[in-house]
Image (cartoon, rainbow, N blue to C red):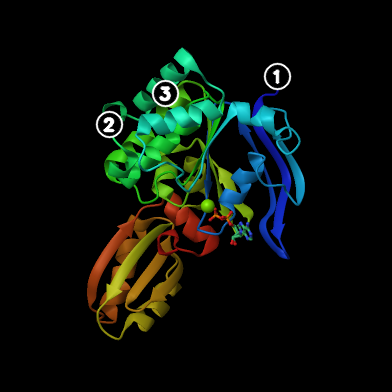
């Protein structure tokens, strides 16, 4: 038995001349929760589609449980659950009837079908609403039904494509709890998101993707230790923002400074340690500080350090 759930070597996908995925290599262990993190357009969904055998790679190799998904789609689909980014539910049918419909597509029948539908409704915590039409559900509840649909055939690996976008907090928590429960049951999870704090909480390892390439791959803790920077965010009320930036950049505790309007983001190794020096600079210049926020190192700041981009602004 191959120890890895997924092995990918130099995977590429181009649409016309433009590479959407540009040389990805990674392996995911059985039982792992693995995150693909990146902004919109980074190539996350394209990677999932290729791994699921739905999109043919331009080049590169893929093995999912030892099988090439492009060549043996049926074998992969029996073991893989895919919860896509876009919803596919019949709004006038109840959640239960939607799930019965999907279960039939998976070849489930009779008692087994009813058992599986009940089990997945429990799993996503919607058993009590199962007989209400889906068009009375919140967006988050619909996403939970989509997740349930991906679990009907008891896959060994589950792909979740941005499962928490536009989701209310209650549904988000239900999705997190499902992920934990599934993983405890031994299911491998591959999860895409552009919410870093979520990935930090859920994933054993993450690959940070930008422009179709992996810019870093490790455990969240290792990435934060190795690349993590703190950020001091200063709002300067008067016209002195440029002067503060110039002086702050000279400080030995400061890595770099970016400026947007009246706001300075001062990237530092250790936020607490750098704070006194930075405030000293502002004070010497008589600059009026109207706001101060301290961000400790996190996956969010790792991403910013590696790509120069703010994920939240995408
Ligand atoms: N079917 C397609 N045809 C043309 N371009 C595509 C297609 N699918 C994705 N792309 C492009 O590939 C890039 C990566 O897209 P995608 O994998 O959806 O990124 P993500 O899921 O990270 O937001 C984007 O620039 C997108 O416009
Ligand atoms: Mg996507």
Crowding at dot 3, Cα within 10 Å, few <14 / some 14-19 / many 20+, comes out as many
Quick one: quadrant of the N terminus? top right
Distance from disc 2 to disc 3, alpha carbons, whole Å, reads 13 Å
Question: Are the residues flagged by discs 2 and 3 in contact, CB closer than 8 Å?
Answer: no
Crowding at dot 2, Cα within 10 Å, few <14 / some 14-19 / many 20+, comes out as some
Residue drawn 67% across and 47% down?
55
Q: Classify the position of ligand 1 by quadrant: top left, top right, bottom left or bottom right.
A: bottom right
Distance from disc 1 to disc 3, alpha carbons, whole Å, reads 31 Å
Residue drawn 61% across and 26% down?
78
Residue under label 3, please give it.
117
Distance from disc 1 to disc 2, alpha carbons, whole Å, reads 41 Å
What is the x, y in percent for residue 234? 31, 69
**Observer-nearest residue: 228 or 170?**
170
Residue drawn 41% across and 52% down?
297
| Residue 31 lies in quadrant | top right
Viewer-nearest of discs 1 and 3: 3
Residue closest to the far front:
92
Residue closest to the far top:
111
Quick one: quadrant of the C terminus? bottom left
Viewer-nearest of discs 1 and 2: 2
| Residue 291 lies in quadrant | bottom left
Which disc is residue 1 wearing?
A: 1
What is the x, y in percent for residue 100? 44, 27
Which disc is residue 129 wearing?
A: 2
What is the x, y in percent for residue 118? 38, 21
- The answer to whether 278 is drawn above or below residue 53 in the figure is below
Left or right of 314: which side holds 43?
A: right
């Amino acid at each position: 038995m191959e120890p890895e759930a997924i092995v990918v070597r130099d995977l590429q996908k181009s649409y016309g001349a433009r590479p959407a995925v540009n040389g990805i290599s990674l392996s995911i262990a059985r039982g792992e929760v693995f995150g693909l993190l990146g902004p919109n357009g980074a190539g996350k969904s394209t990677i999932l589609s290729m791994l699921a055998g739905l999109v043919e790679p331009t080049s590169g190799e893929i093995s999912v449980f030892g099988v090439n998904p492009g060549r043996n789609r049926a074998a992969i689909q029996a073991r893989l659950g895919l919860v896509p980014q876009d919803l596919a539910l019949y709004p006038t049918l109840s959640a239960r009837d939607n799930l019965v419909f999907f279960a039939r597509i998976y070849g489930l029948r009779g008692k087994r079908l009813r058992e599986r539908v009940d089990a997945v409704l429990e799993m996503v915590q919607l058993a009590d609403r199962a007989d209400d039409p889906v068009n009375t559900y919140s967006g988050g509840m619909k996403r939970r039904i989509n997740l349930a649909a991906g679990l009907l055939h008891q896959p060994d690996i589950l792909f979740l494509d941005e499962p928490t976008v536009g989701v209310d907090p209650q549904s988000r928590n239900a999705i997190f709890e499902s992920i934990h429960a599934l993983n405890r049951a031994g299911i491998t999870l591959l999860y895409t998101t552009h919410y870093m704090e979520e990935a930090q909480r859920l994933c054993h390892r993450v690959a940070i993707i930008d422009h179709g390439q992996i810019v870093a791959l490790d455990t969240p803790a290792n990435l934060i230790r190795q690349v993590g920077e703190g950020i001091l965010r200063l709002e300067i009320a008067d016209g002195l923002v440029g002067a503060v930036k110039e002086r702050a950049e000279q400080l030995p505790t400061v890595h770099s400074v970016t400026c947007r309007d009246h706001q300075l983001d001062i990237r530092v190794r250790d936020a607490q340690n750098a704070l006194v020096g930075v405030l000293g600079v502002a004070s010497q210049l008589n600059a009026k500080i109207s706001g101060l926020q301290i961000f400790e190192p996190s996956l969010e700041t790792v991403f910013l350090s590696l790509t120069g981009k703010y994920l939240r602004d995408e």
